[in-house]
Image (tube, rainbow, N blue to C red):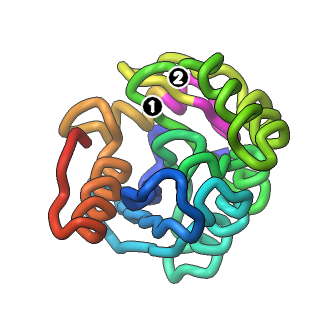
Amino acid sequence: MTTGTTFSHVVGFDDFPFTHGRRGNVPVVGAVYAGLRLEGILSGSVRQDGANATRNLARLVAESKFARRIQLVLLQGIALGGFNVIDVHDLNRRLGIPVLVVARRAPDLASVREALLTRVPGGARKWALVERAGEMEPAAGVWVQRAGLTPEEADLVIRRFAVHGRIPEPLRAAHLIAGGMATGQSRGRT
């Protein structure tokens, strides 16, 4: 396994802002970094509140020109497009590289569970994926879930890539790009 100090090529994914309560696809963007330099962009989509995020992210990475160099996938939260929950362990297995989920604060799991089990199609299966991902744990000022890397490696990755705040630069860039493409300008906290 690669050690946290040698992760040099990473991709961070975020989704476009979207209207809750409707159906359809939500665009996603991946910011590919070589060290602290933006190397490229990946784009695709996931079904809003669907079940294809793991498969679609794996395909985006595996079929990209960056596939042979990417050493780590960063996610801002465990779901895209509302409640399209990513199976982080399956994504790790499909790509053969670590996956690190990052959040500013620990989620309110009771509220997430309630929403999934009462309002989302396939909610029980999605809740099982959340549970399978494991408890979020603190790392370098944020909360993480991880597949394929140690807590120490996760901490090193956050410290290395979080140069303009607590969120790693690939996730910050993906968030800004997604917001700007969707609304004409980026906004909000990154």
**Relative side of 46 to 131, left or right:** left
Give SS at disc 1.
strand
Residue of label 2 = 107
Residue 103's label in the rendered image is 1
Residue 152 on the magenta span: yes
- Measured from the top left, where is residue 183 in percent x and y? 23, 66
Q: Residue at image x 34%, y 58%?
A: 174
Q: Position of residue 133 (x, y in %)?
A: 72, 33
Task: Answer whether residue 68 is visible to the viewer in this image.
Answer: no
Q: Amino acid at mark 1?
A: Ala
Q: Residues within 10 Å of mark 1 (few under 14, many from 20)?
A: many
Residue 57 within the segment the image draws in magenta: no
Q: Quadrant of the C terminus?
A: top left
**In the rendered picture of this protein, how many numbered marks are placed on residues?**
2
31 left or right, relative to 6: left
Find the magenta span and give its range. Answer: 145-154
Which residue is at a point 62% across and 81% down the rendered structure image? 63
Near mark 2 (Cα within 10 A), the count class, few <14, some 14-19 or many ≥20, is few
